[in-house]
Image (cartoon, grey):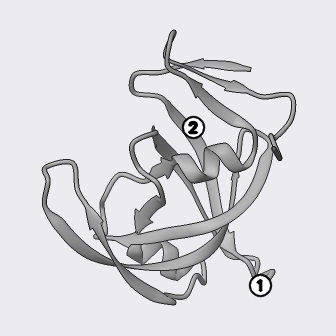
Amino acid sequence: MIVKMGLTKVTTKISGTEGNKEFYEDIFLVDTRATDSLAPSDELEKAGISKIGKMSYSLADGAIKEYYYGIAKIEFMGEITAGRIIFATPGTEPILGVTALESVRIMVDPANKTLKRLPAIPLK
């Protein structure tokens, strides 16, 4: 599957890693400049995701801001992974970061600005 880049968006489902039945599903902006994924804090809390730490992040405008984060199950494009998710201000557009993409063999081809699925994850 190849997806054209630009303002690429993908339906993503976020849930807790403890097997709870609550989840948050929305259309996430794919942002290859963002390491971690991000979603509105009120939606993450409804999905039963707990804050487990706080970290400083560099924003697009150069500002540094601290955000709480948790660990969540992340599902998109028929794949499942788990990773850090940032608790953003309610109403913030959700972002799918590059760590989630790469963990399920989806890479960015910078030459033609597409997302493509690799046949295997490199271990070397």
Report helix, strand or loop for mark 1: loop
Q: Quadrant of the N terminus?
A: top right
Q: How crowded is mark 1: few (under 14 residues within 10 Å), some or many (20 or more)?
A: few
| Residue 32: % across, % down | 46, 39
Residue hosting label 1 = 18
Residue 23 as seen in the image, left or right of residue 122: left
Quadrant for residue 91, please give it.
Answer: bottom left
The numbered mark, 2 or 1, whose residue comes first in the sequence reads 2
Residue at 50%, 82% in the rendered image = 45
Residue at 18%, 67% in the rendered image = 64
Report helix, strand or loop for mark 2: strand
Quadrant for residue 68, please give it.
Answer: bottom left
Residue hosting label 2 = 10
| Residue 112: % across, % down | 51, 9
Give the residue type that dot 2 points to.
Val
Residue 93 as seen in the image, left or right of residue 65: right
Number of marks in the rendered image: 2
| Residue 57: % across, % down | 30, 66
Residue at 79%, 46% in the rendered image = 79
Give the residue type that dot 1 points to.
Glu
